[in-house]
Image (tube, rainbow, N blue to C red):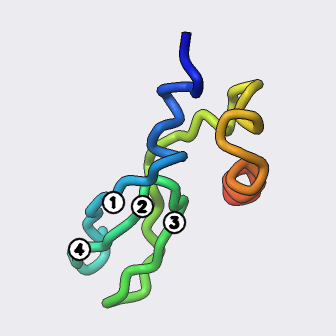
Amino acid sequence: MFDKCPGAAHIRTPTLQLKTCPKCGAEIEMFSTDMQHDCPKCKQTVYNDLESCVQWCTYARECVGEETYQRLKKEQ
């Protein structure tokens, strides 16, 4: 039915998200594949609150590719 899992689209084609630093209120640009990013203003670490299917899906390695799989598993 599908060539690739539709749930992993944000991993294969990252989207840019804007987060707000909880410490200073600065706007932070973070891609959907980033697990964390430091605020450019105050250096506070801000975490991406999206759970990745890579963390639980049996077919994740095949779906997103070995390099992305290893990076996301390492950062969880």
Q: Secondary structure at mark 2?
A: strand
Residue positioned most to the bottom: 41
Residue 45 on image: x %, y %: 47, 74
For image coordinates 56% across by 40% down, the residue present is 52
Separation of residues labelled 3 and 1 (CA atoms): 13 Å
CB within 8 Å, label 1 to label 2 = yes
In this rendering, position of residue 24 left or right of residue 72: left
In this rendering, position of residue 52 left or right of residue 24: right
Instruction: Kindly identify the amino acid type of the residue bearing the numbered disc 1.
Output: Leu
Residue 44 on image: x %, y %: 43, 79
The crowd level at tag 4 (other Cα within 10 Å; few <14, some 14-19, many 20+) is: some
Mark 3 / mark 1, whichever is N-terminal: 1
Q: Nearer the viewer, mark 1 or mark 4?
A: 1
Q: Which residue is mark 3?
A: 36
Choose between 69 and 20: the one closer to the eye: 69
Mark 3 / mark 4, whichever is N-terminal: 4
The crowd level at tag 1 (other Cα within 10 Å; few <14, some 14-19, many 20+) is: few
Q: Which residue is mark 4?
A: 27
CB within 8 Å, label 3 to label 4 = no
In this rendering, position of residue 27 left or right of residue 67: left
Instruction: Kindly identify the amino acid type of the residue bearing the numbered disc 3.
Output: Gln
Separation of residues labelled 3 and 2 (CA atoms): 9 Å
Q: Secondary structure at mark 4?
A: strand
Instruction: Kindly identify the amino acid type of the residue bearing the numbered disc 4.
Output: Glu
